[in-house]
Image (tube, grey):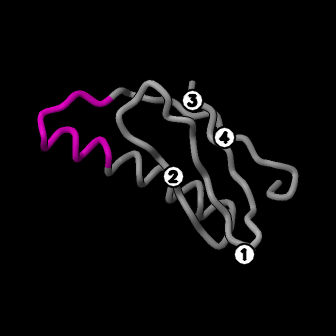
Amino acid sequence: MEKVIVELGNDNKYSAYMDCCGYDFGLAGFGSTAKEAVEDFYESYREEREMCAKEGKPCPELEFDIRYDIASS
């Protein structure tokens, strides 16, 4: 299970990201709320899987553990 961190930035916008060590892609999501950032993160994963499929490249089936920092919870 991959850990995803949701943080509130200085601009009062949220980001959701994971450490992609070991993968040849990065995943991140952004939004005005923590929920929007997480939804955008999942959309970036769906888009990555679609792109891999079109290119005939393998893409791992990942599960995510969403973690909120103190300011975002």
Q: In 3D space, how far apart are the residues under numbered discs 2 and 3 (Cα atoms)?
A: 13 Å
**In the figure, residue 36 lies in which quadrant?**
bottom right
Looking at the image, residue 19 lies above or below residue 43: above
Looking at the image, residue 13 lies above or below residue 26: below
- Drawn side of residue 46 relative to residue 26, left or right: left
Which mark is on residue 66?
A: 4
In-front residue for pair 69/43: 69
Q: Earlier in the sequence, mark 1 or mark 4?
A: 1
Residue occupying image coordinates x 22% and y 39%: 52
Residue at numbered disc 3: 2
Q: In 3D space, how far apart are the residues under numbered discs 3 and 4 (Cα atoms)?
A: 8 Å
Which mark is on residue 61?
A: none
Residue occupying image coordinates x 44% and y 24%: 22
Could you tell me which secondary element the residue under label 4 belongs to?
strand
Residue at numbered disc 2: 28
Could you tell me which secondary element the residue under label 1 belongs to?
loop
Looking at the image, residue 42 lies above or below residue 12: above
Q: Earlier in the sequence, mark 2 or mark 3?
A: 3
Magenta stretch: includes residue 53: yes
Label 2 neighbour load within 10 Å: few <14, some 14-19, many 20+: many
Label 4 neighbour load within 10 Å: few <14, some 14-19, many 20+: some
Magenta stretch: includes residue 33: no
- The residue most toward the right is 70
**In the figure, residue 7 lies in which quadrant?**
bottom right
Q: Nearer the viewer, mark 1 or mark 4?
A: 1
Please say if the residues under marks 2 and 3 sit with CB atoms less than 8 Å apart: no
Residue at numbered disc 1: 11
- Drawn side of residue 64 relative to residue 5, left or right: left
Q: In 3D space, how far apart are the residues under numbered discs 1 and 4 (Cα atoms)?
A: 21 Å
Kind of residue indicated by mark 3: Glu
Q: In 3D space, how far apart are the residues under numbered discs 1 and 3 (Cα atoms)?
A: 26 Å
